[in-house]
Image (spheres, helix red, strand yellow):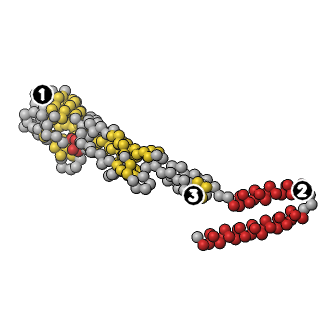
């Protein structure tokens, strides 16, 4: 600060000496024509050397002046909004979502009312936003939270499903009331009571809304049923569609084929 003052003092001192010499030179000039030519240059020089643009120099203010060099105390501030909790939240489809809200204050710390608009639809997979706004005499500030509604392993596991299919009652006789539980790993599922009468368990791997059932075998005493499949869960997490490929080696009732099964969550 002291160094800056010394620099300004030196600049003013040398300019004063220059101006003094210039005035003496002007006095010695005999023609008014030269005086009228040089005097405006002196006036402009004085203006440029002594004036600084004033205004709001705080970039966070609503009336920030980027060309101002000296703050004149005119800065105006909109409210400051702070989100409660994380700016991005992820929940399972069908789960309950309770927003954490937000707070807002003025520059002096006084509270400002926050208006919230919640667009989250927990019944459907998607990306949603919770919007916040706060207003004072200087304007309105907005903020938002992102809420991702997804399908996870929890959506696949349910004690009760009802199955309808095109698979028939003999070669690939799916049970109509299976149970889907968590498998050996976090991204694995087991479909218990898989076949009608003989039961059995089919294992699959889930990835978001997709399921893959690798080739596997269930023995039904008189033969084997070899099968695999792929499927998807709908965006509301309430229905699974799986296409199965099968080969039943049981005499008389066996056979090969492809069929579709629809699992509806109860």
Q: Which mark is residue 206?
A: none
Q: Kindly identify the residue that appears in the image at 80 percent across and 55 percent down.
A: 40
Query: Mark 1 highlights which residue?
Result: 169
Q: Kindly identify the residue that appears in the image at 45 percent across and 44 percent down.
A: 140
Query: Mark 3 highlights which residue?
Result: 71
- In front: mark 3 or mark 2? 2
Could you give the CA–CA distance between mark 3 and mark 2, rounded to whole angstroms? Answer: 42 Å
N-terminal of the two: label 1 or label 3? 3
Q: How crowded is mark 3: few (under 14 residues within 10 Å), some or many (20 or more)?
A: some
Q: In which quarter of the image is the N terminus?
A: bottom right
Query: Mark 2 highlights which residue?
Result: 32
Q: Hey, which residue is sitting farthest right in the picture?
A: 30
Name the spot of residue 242 as percent of width and height, x first.
Answer: 23, 34
Secondary-structure class at tag 1: loop
Q: Kindly identify the residue that appears in the image at 79 percent across and 59 percent down.
A: 42
Q: Kindly identify the residue that appears in the image at 71 percent across and 61 percent down.
A: 49
Would you say 143 lies left or right of 173 here?
right
């Amino acid at each position: 600060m002291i160094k800056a003052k010394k620099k300004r003092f030196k600049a003013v001192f040398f300019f004063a000496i220059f101006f003094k010499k210039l005035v003496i030179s002007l006095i010695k000039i005999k023609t008014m024509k030269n005086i009228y030519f040089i005097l405006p240059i002196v006036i402009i020089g004085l203006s440029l050397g002594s004036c600084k643009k004033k205004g709001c120099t705080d970039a966070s203010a609503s009336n920030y002046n980027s060309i101002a060099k000296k703050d004149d105390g005119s800065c105006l501030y909109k409210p400051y909004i702070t989100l409660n909790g994380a700016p991005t939240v992820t929940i399972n489809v069908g789960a309950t979502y309770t927003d954490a809200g937000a707070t807002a204050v003025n520059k002096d710390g006084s509270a400002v009312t926050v208006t919230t608009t919640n667009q989250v639809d927990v019944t459907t997979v998607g990306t949603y936003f919770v919007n916040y706004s706060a207003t004072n005499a200087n304007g309105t500030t907005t903020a938002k939270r992102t809420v991702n509604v997804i399908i996870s392993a929890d959506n696949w596991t349910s004690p009760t499903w009802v199955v309808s299919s095109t698979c028939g009652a003999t070669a690939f006789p799916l049970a109509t009331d299976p149970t889907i539980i968590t498998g050996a790993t976090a991204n694995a599922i087991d479909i218990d009571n898989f076949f009608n009468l003989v039961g059995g368990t089919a294992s699959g791997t889930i990835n978001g809304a997709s399921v893959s059932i690798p080739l596997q075998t269930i023995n039904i005493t008189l033969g084997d049923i070899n099968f695999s499949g792929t499927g998807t869960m709908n965006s509301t997490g309430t229905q699974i569609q799986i296409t199965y490929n099968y080969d039943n080696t049981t005499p008389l009732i066996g056979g090969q084929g492809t069929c579709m099964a629809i699992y509806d969550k109860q």
